Amino acid sequence: MNCGTSVLAIWSIDAPAAMQRNVRRETPVAPPSTSRPTRPAIAKREKTTRATTASLARPSPKLPPSTRLSRLLDEQLASAIAQSDSEWGPPLLSQGHLRGSEPYEDALANRLQHSIDDATVNLESVFRRLDAAAPVELGQLSAVAMEIMQELVKDLDLFVSLGIDLPEGSYLHQHCVHVAMLAMAVAANMNYGPRAIMDLGVGCLLHDVGMLRVPGRVYEQERELSSDEFDLVVVHPIHTLTLLEEHFELFTMNARMVAYQMHERCDGTGYPRGLKAGMIHPLARIAAVADAYVALVSVRPHRPGLLPYHALRHLLGEVQQGLYDARVVRSLLKTLSLFPLGSFVKLNDDRMGRVIRANGANFDRPVIEIVDATGVPSGRGLIDLCRISALRVVSAVDRPMVPG
């Protein structure tokens, strides 16, 4: 399925008709109660959703001039794409990796969170030393990507749930870790093999280091960037290549292409080269979707994060406009579900639940855990909406607020 395929065509082969009807309409946000965010807070989210959609009208960025390294990668692009295809290899995940109504293991969740924290600390050190032109051991990034991949196969849903749960005030290195986690999970659901997923992870970990060289750190502004400021940000993939020039031999061609191309868009409106789908590396197309989703749900200095459901709906709209590879976004849906992992939903019997597991191609019928008005689990186990046809999700709701 190529870039620009209609949203409904993404799942038209095997998705239930009920879900296709659901995607044609906007799912309402449940009204607030005393234990949920206030009406002004929800209104601010809805205003943010409209503002984000309006930002699609942003004119094409002013593309930066090429450099020796960017020209080298441009020349190597065709062979890199061929290399990626030849490295498809045996899939990382087995066909039976879905866990149904199995709950998360607390011990595994704790180990995984520890791994995420370690990866974030290690990457922060790498970014800091690169920015200061200090000696740095970049070979450790492969070890970080390997550890992330090993955690992925233990419980994909738990891995993704933690990977898309970003703390407020996230920094560049935290963003890169979470983008790497989501991208690697999406690639695993696309049946990529370990070697390609490792390359994807390393490229994602490094992709934003060039932001450290953006003049005035304009990306930290507490307002929407002007066109001139955005043009400064557009150069950061070139800055990334410059910062990594002395260490190029440590990274595979696939990893280099991910870091260089993941801000390109299938319709040619991306950067730094304004390339269209056929000239964008397949792994970079995966990274682009993961990066966009993580950015949308993240709190930024100038806006709150979107509800995960609204972020996914926004991406689906951009697939219709031709920005992303529809096959990648289909895999994102399989990975997250239409109501993304970790988010809260209201059921047609007025109960509230938290999404615990995705259900493959049954995008709108995830596995949920019933919670009370403060988000505390009811203790009644998990409900697989694929097995109870009378129950369905009627709306996405904001994360409950614990009183006090």
Image (cartoon, rainbow, N blue to C red):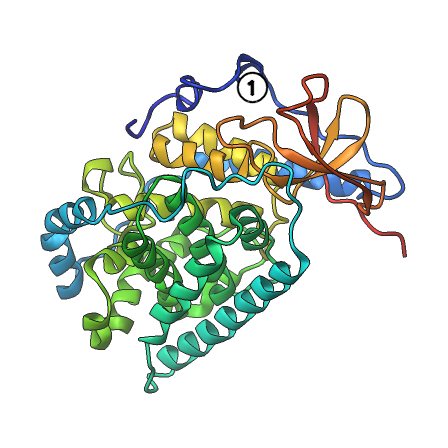
- Whether residue 355 sits left or right of residue 68 in the image: it is right
Tell me the residue at 51%/64% (across/down). Answer: 174
Look at the image and tell me whether residue 323 can be seen.
no
The C terminus - image quarter: bottom right
Q: Residues within 10 Å of mark 1 (few under 14, many from 20)?
A: some
Residue 22, quarter of picture = top right
The N terminus - image quarter: top left
Mark 1 lies on a secondary structure that is helix
197 versus 68 height, above or below = above
Look at the image and tell me whether residue 275 can be seen.
yes
Residue linked to disc 1: 19
160 versus 312 height, above or below = below
Q: Amino acid at mark 1?
A: Met
Residue 396, quarter of picture = top right
- The count of marks equals 1
Tell me the residue at 53%/45% (across/down). Answer: 296
Question: Quick one: 221 or 29, which is closer to the camera?
Answer: 29
Residue 224 percent coordinates (x, y): 53, 50
Residue 133 percent coordinates (x, y): 33, 83
